[in-house]
Image (cartoon, rainbow, N blue to C red):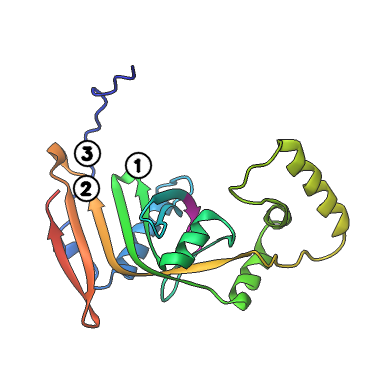
Amino acid sequence: MLNIRHLRKRYHLNSLELTDLDPHPFLQFQKWFKQAQEAGILEPNAMVLATASLEGRPSSRTVLLKGIDEGFFFFTNLKSRKAVEIEQTSYASATLLWKELERQVILEGSVKPMNRKETDAYFAERPRGSQIASWISPQGQVIRSRQELEDRFQELEKRYEGKEIPLPPHWGGYRIFPTRVEFWQGRENRLHDRFQYLFQDGEWLIQRLAP
């Protein structure tokens, strides 16, 4: 048996008060994200994306947040499980944990696909190896071996040698439009500070939550 009941972390670095928060959650997120970058956190844009099937079966995985404008956006294989579930329900939740700062942010809301022009512009910025991987990986599907991927990779490397690699038709972006954003700050004795932003009647309402 795995007995890990004794594992505990004392949270003591910071507090979070209503007066600390920006009236808009996107600006508050950017403030915290900048602090996460300055703290040297490895991949501060890593977020656990949770989706669900039409039958209500949840699934989750880590993706990389790639920017914020009118929503929070990321890119993925459009035939992956997450993409299929997003197309079925149009909703998702994402969690970013910055444990070195004892902080967590949760986003919940509707999800819409990004247009091909936006996706193509980002794809062109990706490292060449990542571009090739986007073509050859049937994400989430069963494959025979690692060698199968390596062979496909080498094949495409030769095919596009000296050429630009085009955007795969099965690869694109999604934008999360949150209607709820929660900011969590770890505190002593598990009396954590939690605030949620709720989008109601065209404006953001901020509420403190019990830990």
Residues rendered magenta in the picture: 62-66
Q: Position of residue 183 (x, y in %)?
A: 26, 57
Please give the label number shown on residue 40. none
Of callouts 1 and 3, the N-terminal one: 3
- Farthest residue to the top: give it: 1
Alpha carbon separation for disc pair 1 and 3: 10 Å
The crowding category of the residue bearing disc 3, from other C-alpha atoms within 10 Å (few below 14, some 14 to 19, many at least 20), is some
Q: Closer to the N terminus: mark 1 or mark 2?
A: 2
The secondary structure type at the circle numbered 3 is: loop
- Look at label 2 and name its amino acid: Asn
**Relative to 176, residue 56 above or below:** above
Q: Which residue lies under the disc numbered 2? A: 14
**Amino acid beneath label 3:** Tyr
Evaluate if marks 3 and 2 touch, with contact meaning CB atoms under 8 Å apart. Answer: no
- In the rendered structure, the answer to whether residue 70 lies left or right of residue 202 reads right
Give the class, few, some or many, for how many residues have Cα within 10 Å of label 2's Cα (few <14, many ≥20): few
**Residue position for label 3:** 11
Residue 104 vs 12, above or below: the answer is below
- Magenta part, dominant SS: strand
Residue that sits furthest to the bottom in the current view? 202
Q: CA distance from mark 1 to mark 2?
A: 11 Å
Q: Residue at x 62, y 47 (%)?
A: 141
Q: Residue at x 58, y 62 (%)?
A: 78
Residue located beneath label 1 in the image: 100
Q: Position of residue 76 (x, y in %)?
A: 57, 59
Q: Is residue 64 magenta?
A: yes
